[in-house]
Image: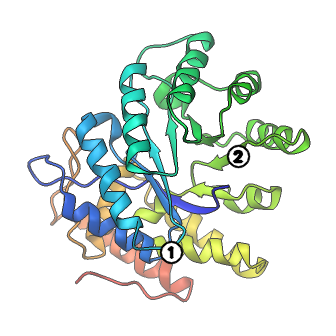
Amino acid sequence: MITGSLVPNITIFDKEGNLDIEKNRWHMDWMLKKGADGLFLTGSYGSGPMMTHEERVTVFKTAKEVAARYEGKTLLAHVGCIDTRSTIALAKAAEEIGVDAISAVPPFYYKHSEELILQFYKDIISSTTLPVFAYNNPETSRFTFTMNTVRKLQEMGLAGMKDSPLAVGFVSRVFYDAKVNKKNFQMILGTSSGWLPFYYMGVRAMIAGMNNWAPEIITALVKATQDGDQEKSEKVYLGMMDLSAKLHFTDSTIASLMALHARGFDAGFPRKPMQLPPFDDPKYQEIRQWLEAGFADLGMTLETGK
């Protein structure tokens, strides 16, 4: 079972849009060192759909090298592509590299029937020995999972689901259906929002975007929750939610990069058409103030690059 908090880590590029291996290696190592329990690679935050097969494989290899320095870190590689053939090719590459599990969003852009989505996952599951997780993100995939869809996928051997919308009725129904009927199936939250109430329900893992730029806070939240320190976990959860809300002023990938730069780290660039504001934009200073206040409120020290 995957436990704790993984990070949907951003993929860092240089100013010309080339993959910046050294900065990605630094960022992965920094997050794991700060307590993140693993990496969710080349998903939405990670610009997966904007990258070539070779680039995504390079990110998988880099993550494997970095994670080898630590004990018990999970590598969950997102291999979802717009077509089945490319997805399977990436799944096989991820297995050869030695990640722990793979995940795939339903094929996006085109709107597909449930029958075709089921076949898509059946093909992935039959192509690898790794645990396969579905990635429920209807905003990008144009497909919404139902309880009926999930049950059919479970019969095919799907290992679990990363859920981003966090519709309470859907998540709780899938979770309790698996628990009551003793199915080997794991629900993973696709965000840190809702972590505390869903943890009390029994969910044990999340993929938290804040790990990209404030892993110390997410680590403190997970530790307090796992330790049963309700008072501290509630305080950290509220601080996390307040700070997270402030950073939702733009796309999550851009906000993550801006927050890293605001902390004084040379965190590179996104790939166009995504673009960072000029570094003299006052928004960076505002983010720095938000971070300093948020960390101070939780009795934590904000480490900066400069």
Instruction: Work out which quarter of the rendered image holds the N terminus and state it.
Output: bottom right
Q: Residue at the spot x=46%, y=80% of the render?
A: 293
In the image, residue 222 above or below residue 306 = above
Q: Residue 304: x, y in percent?
A: 31, 82
- Residue 7 x/y as whole percent: 47, 58
Element assignment for label 1: loop
> Can you see residue 245?
no
Q: In the depicted view, which residue is nearer to us: 154 or 282?
A: 154
Circle 1: is it few (<14), some (14-19), or many (20+) Cα within 10 Å?
many
Q: Residue furthest left?
A: 16
Mark 2 / mark 1, whichever is N-terminal: 1
Can you give x and y, in whole percent of width and height, for residue 245 in the image? 51, 59
Q: Which mark is residue 186?
A: 2
Instruction: Using the rendered image of the protein, determine whether residue 222 is visible from the camera's viewpoint.
Output: yes
- What residue is shown with label 1? 35
Residues 263 and 268: in front is 268
In what element is the residue under mark 2?
Answer: strand
Residue ID at (50%, 62%): 38
User: Badge 2, how many Cα within 10 Å: few under 14, some, many 20+?
Assistant: many
The quarter holding residue 63 reads: bottom left
The Cα–Cα distance between marks 2 and 1, rounded to whole angstroms, is 22 Å
Picture coordinates of residue 95 (x, y %)?
A: 44, 43
- The disc labelled 1 sits on which kind of residue? Gly
Amino acid type at circle 2 is Gln
